[in-house]
Image (spheres, rainbow, N blue to C red):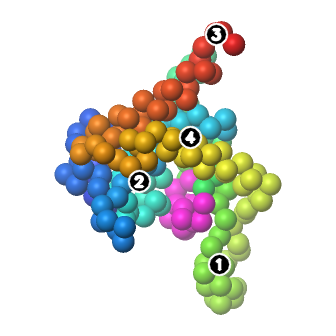
Amino acid sequence: MTRGAGSNYTNLGIEPPDHGIGRSRGGLTSKIHHLVDGRGRPLVVLVGPGQAHDGPVLEHLLAHVKVHRRGGRPRTRPDRVRADKAYSSRATRTRLRRRGIGAVIPEPSDQIANRKRRGARGGRPPAFNAEDYKGRNVVERNFNVVKQWRGLATRYDKLALVYRGAAVLRAITLWLPHLSDTP
């Protein structure tokens, strides 16, 4: 298994030693990683350092998915994952395939070139549904809504737990209109 960023994604109640802050060209930064449903409602929210790659966090996001439903235990496996090119690795696709999750992830141009360069040994291109991929903009729109809160857009919080708490609070406010029984 590949090791992700330095933050502790497995136990959300413990403050990570790096506080979810990473150094990048713009200074100290953080990233909010989230998993949303088809309507743009956040299901899982995690915080990580800004310079860390997004790919290793996907496994931790999927590990925390619990969608409650009537008459049974909660679902922990989505039907498919729509992600951008940052998640297009052989390891990610293998993990998703092993769990029975469909991957709607475009292949980056360098991976296409490497596969073609290898000829028959390069294998077949991974399946990609361009029409289904159009639904990925739901995630980007959700980021725009989340970042409308000034505290989340600029991260004034010192501790990652407090910053994640604000992101979860924003997720709750996005869910409230859907849970209300009044129009």
**Residue corresponding to mark 2:** 31
How far, Cα to Cα, is label 4 from label 2? 15 Å
Which span of residues is magenta-colored? 84-96
**Residue corresponding to mark 4:** 145
Q: Are marks 4 and 2 in contact (CB under 8 Å)?
A: no
**Residue corresponding to mark 1:** 109
Does 133 sit above or below residue 74?
below
Residue 181: mark: 3
What's the amino acid at mark 4? Answer: Val
Does 30 sit above or below residue 71?
below
How far, Cα to Cα, is label 2 from label 3? 34 Å
Side (left or right) of 159 relative to 70: left
What's the amino acid at mark 2? Answer: Lys
Say what secondary structure mark 1 lies in. helix
**Mark closest to the chain's N terminus, 2 or 3:** 2
The N terminus sits in image quarter: bottom left
Say what secondary structure mark 4 lies in. helix
Q: Nearer the viewer, mark 4 or mark 2?
A: 4
